[in-house]
Structures are given as C-alpha cells and as structure tokens.
Image (cartoon, helix red, strand yellow):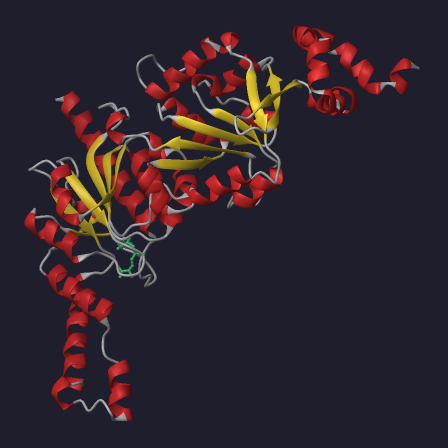
C-alpha cells in the first residue's frame, strides 16, 4: 500500500544504503536556505535526481544566486575497470595513468557543479568563440566533445578549464577530480545546439591546448622512423582520419603545414579519435620551418597519385594551351577575347602547372619499393590541388621520390587519409621485418 501511494518512498528506502551519506546535508538549515529548489529537488523528483542531491544555493560571484548540486559517485570503481586493459607496466603512459586513477577512485571527492539554464549567455558565448580558429589560436584553448577525447586529454596532462555536461551520468569514467575544472550542468538541447553529431554524448569541455613538447614520445617499440607531413589538407574529416592512421602506424611525428585545416577544429578532433594526445603533432607550420623539425639525414618523399605517363600528357596539354592564346594579340574590348580569357588558366592552375613541371624532375617509385627503414618523411597532398611546390622542392633537395600507390580500374586517386594508411603501414611492415632480421643475424 505504502509503495503504491509513495513509489519514490519505497525506491528511496530500498536504496537507503546508497543515500545515507547525504543525510547530514538534508538538515533544516540547508532546506530553509534553498526553499524553492529543495521543494523541487527533494520532494517532486528526488529519486530521479539521485544520486545527484541538490543541496544549497550559492552566490555565483556576479550577485546572482545559482543552484549548486552535490553528487558522490557510487560504484564508479566498477565502471572504470572495463576500460583498464592492464598493459605491461611502463609500456603506455596513458593506460598507466588510468590505472592510477582507478587506484584513487575511492578517494574521489564529492562532485560539485553549477546548474546553468538555457537563458544563461555565458555558455553560448564561450561555445561560439571556441568555434573560431582565430580565438583558439589566440587563447590556445580547445573545445573537446565526448567522453573519450576528454579522458584522453586529461590523461595527457592537458589543463581542463570547464566541463559542460547535461546529465550526471555523462561524467561516468571521466577523472574530473584530477582537474581543477569548473563543472557546469547545461540542458541537453544546448549541447545538441553546439554539437556536430546527431546524438551527442552530452558532454563537452574546454581545455588548454597541450604543448606537444610535453606529450610523451612514443616508445621505441611502437614508433617507426617516419614523419608524416600534411600539405594543404582542407577537409577536417580527412585531416582527422589521416592523423589517426599516421599515429596508429607509429609515425614518430606529424607536421601540419600552414594552409591545412586547424587540427583543433571539432571535426578534426572527432575524426582523429584521440590521435591528438598520443604523439607530437606540430600545427600550422610555415613551409620554411619544416626543415627545422627534420634531422639532416631524413629523405623526404612526396605521395603522388599520378604516374609518369600522366606527366607526359600534362606537358603536351601545356604546350597546346600556350599556342592557342597569345597575350600580345588580346583586345580587351572584344567579346571573343573575353571568352578566350575565361578559358585561360587561372592562378591556381598556373601554380599547379609549375608544381607539375617540378614534379617531373622527381623520379617515381611504387610505395613498396621505397626503403622506409631509413629515416624518412612522406608529404601527403591536399584534396584539390595535390602537392605544393615547397613540398616538391624539399623532395628534390633530399633526393626523395614521388611515391605512387598503383590503383586498378583507372581510378584517379585515393583519399588523403587512405593514402597515408597505405604508406605508413608499409613503412611499419618494412621496419618490423628489418628489426626481426637484425635479431636473427
Ligand atoms: C585526393 S588526393 C589529391 C588529388 C589531387 N586532385 C591531385 O591531383 O593530386 C590527396 C593526396 O593523397 C595522396 N594520394 C592519393 N592517391 C594516391 C596514390 N594513388 N598514390 C600516391 N599518393 C596518393 C597524394 O599525396 C594526394 O596529393
């Protein structure tokens, strides 16, 4: 009878062992202080909210009072454990750190967060700003979405400023207590508004961009003597996927040159799936500084989808274009001339032709015929214009090759990230073979 009339009461009593530690909070003083909130929180939907137990109203600093919730994570140790793959000690810093987190799980402090409603402009303002590359570059901050990325960033030692979450459960598995982050609970529809995914996980966080110099170097066991250089990769999904495979193959470092999409763009981060926090990625590098990141004996190759025959055809086409239009004969008032001009190569096309001429001087090899066991770098070109002139110059200077991945059925090219996977995993295969042979001799 009692359970039918007061279903929440019976739920409460059956879970009493879980809530008993809150009893001291439910004293008359607290309830009096937060009359409205307590009425809503404790009487109407206490069981739904539990284990989040609202308890007091505090001054936010700006003169307004805000609702503050307290929450103690129960049984979180069990929820952590499936993520721990028990690596051999000393092998992977990230996982070892996770282990430490699990060790301290019992010592977790109480979760204290501020509840922010949809009308609060603070959240919208910061989330709008975080979408701007300029703002990210100026403040050296980054917005991360989803549990996996946030955990990776915390474990990589990146400084966490604020965590926005829509339900307390969204914080599961996140070692928020390892940070000094401010915790703001925001309505799910706000997260949805800012997220690019259809069903967001309901958690986002603002971090300082990690300094890649501070990130752990990959262990010698895992890494291969290869640098991947990104040249004009404009599509965020491509760059993210490229970083993901380059890191997965064990590339020693990744250089992202100016002209590529920002590696801290939300979509790049999502497609990168944690690659950003696992090895050294140098962002936004002008081409003339690239050499500073490479040892003197590194051979720089460029990945190119065209074969030598294609270059011969390009050369012939060039000659034809030149013979059709003689600039000295142009009359700018003549309609036919204007038509001719519209057919003239534009600036991008002229640049492409320069690169093609230069590329013609660099010998071609299929990707499996390159010796990847020596210190090497591979440049991956952009989606629209392929490789830049600076990349080709560097290959020429270091006696590198045009690396070609043969394709069947007349396919033109692979996606940049796919080409990266093919090349980097071939490099890894050769490197492992070579190590194995050295061991046997
Ligand atoms: C989508 S492709 C660029 C196609 C571009 N229109 C061009 O003309 O180069 C992007 C990059 O992936 C690499 N790539 C794609 N397919 C390749 C292949 N079959 N062999 C070697 N590299 C390839 C090259 O670095 C290329 O610049």
Asked whether residue 26 is in view, the answer is no
Answer whether residue 432 is visible to the viewer in this image. Answer: yes
Residue 423's x, y, as percent? 25, 44
Image quadrant, ligand 1: bottom left
Q: Position of residue 323 (x, y in %)?
A: 14, 84
Q: Which residue lies at the image location 15% right of the left edge and 39% below the top edge?
A: 376
Question: Residue 144: which quarter of the image?
Answer: top left
At 54% from the left and 40% from the top, the residue drawn is 121
Residue 316, relative to residue 417: is it above or below? below
Question: On the picture, is 136 further left or further right than 380?
Answer: right
Residue depicted at 78% across the width and 16% down the height: 11
**Quadrant position of the C terminus in the picture:** top left
* In the displayed structure image, the side of residue 236 where residue 230 appears, left or right: left
411 lies left or right of 3: left
Q: Quadrant of residue 85?
A: top left
Percent x, y for residue 42? Answer: 74, 19
Name of the residue lying farthest toward the front: 63
User: Does 233 sit above or below residue 12?
Assistant: below
- The quarter of the rendered structure image containing the N terminus is top right
Compared with 69, 165 (above or below) is below
- Could you tell whether 166 is left or right of 423 in the image? right
Residue in the picture at 59% in, 32% down: 116
Tell which of 284 and 357 is nearer to you: 284
Comparing 98 with 257, the one in front is: 257
The number of numbered badges drawn on the structure is 0
- Point out residue 416 in the picture as x, y percentages from the top left corner: 31, 51
Q: Quadrant of residue 157?
A: top left
| Nearer to the camera, 267 or 250 | 267
């Amino acid at each position: 009878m009692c359970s039918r009339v007061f279903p929440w009461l019976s739920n409460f009593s059956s879970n009493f062992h879980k809530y008993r530690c809150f009893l001291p909070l439910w004293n008359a003083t607290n309830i009096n202080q937060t009359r409205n909130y307590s009425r809503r929180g404790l009487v109407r939907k206490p069981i739904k909210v539990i284990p989040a137990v609202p308890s007091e109203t505090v001054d936010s600093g700006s003169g307004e009072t805000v609702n503050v919730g307290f929450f103690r994570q129960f049984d979180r140790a069990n929820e952590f454990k499936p993520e721990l793959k028990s690596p051999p000690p000393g092998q992977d810093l990230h996982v070892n750190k996770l282990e430490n987190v699990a060790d301290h799980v019992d010592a977790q402090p109480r979760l204290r967060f501020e509840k922010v409603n949809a009308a609060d402009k603070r959240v919208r303002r910061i989330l709008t700003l975080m979408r701007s590359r300029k703002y990210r570059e100026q403040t050296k901050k980054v917005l991360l979405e989803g549990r996996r990325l946030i955990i990776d960033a915390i474990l990589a030692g990146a400084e966490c400023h604020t965590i926005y979450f829509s339900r307390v459960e969204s914080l599961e598995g996140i070692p928020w207590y390892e940070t000094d982050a401010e915790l703001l609970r925001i309505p799910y529809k706000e997260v949805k508004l800012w997220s690019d995914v259809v069903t967001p996980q309901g958690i986002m966080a603002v971090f300082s961009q990690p300094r890649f110099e501070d990130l752990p170097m990959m262990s010698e066991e895992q890494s291969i003597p290869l640098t991947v250089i990104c040249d004009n990769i404009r599509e965020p999904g491509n760059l993210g996927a490229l970083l993901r495979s380059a890191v997965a193959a064990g590339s020693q470092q990744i250089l992202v040159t100016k002209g590529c999409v920002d590696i801290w763009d939300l979509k790049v981060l999502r497609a990168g799936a944690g690659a950003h926090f696992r090895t050294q990625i140098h962002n936004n590098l002008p081409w003339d500084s690239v050499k500073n990141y490479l040892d003197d004996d590194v051979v720089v190759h460029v990945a190119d989808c065209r074969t030598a025959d294609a270059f011969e055809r390009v050369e012939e086409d060039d000659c034809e274009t030149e013979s059709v239009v003689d600039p000295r004969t142009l009359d700018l008032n003549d309609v036919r001339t204007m038509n001719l001009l519209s057919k003239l190569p534009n600036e991008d096309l002229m640049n492409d032709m320069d690169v093609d001429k230069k590329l013609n001087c660099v010998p071609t090899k299929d990707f499996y015929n390159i010796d990847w066991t020596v210190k090497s770098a591979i440049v991956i070109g952009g989606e629209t214009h392929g490789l830049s002139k600076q990349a080709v110059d560097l290959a020429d200077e270091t006696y590198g090759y045009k690396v070609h991945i043969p394709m069947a059925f007349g396919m033109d090219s692979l996606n940049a990230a796919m080409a990266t996977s093919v090349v980097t995993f071939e490099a890894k295969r050769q490197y492992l073979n070579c190590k194995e042979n050295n061991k046997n001799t």
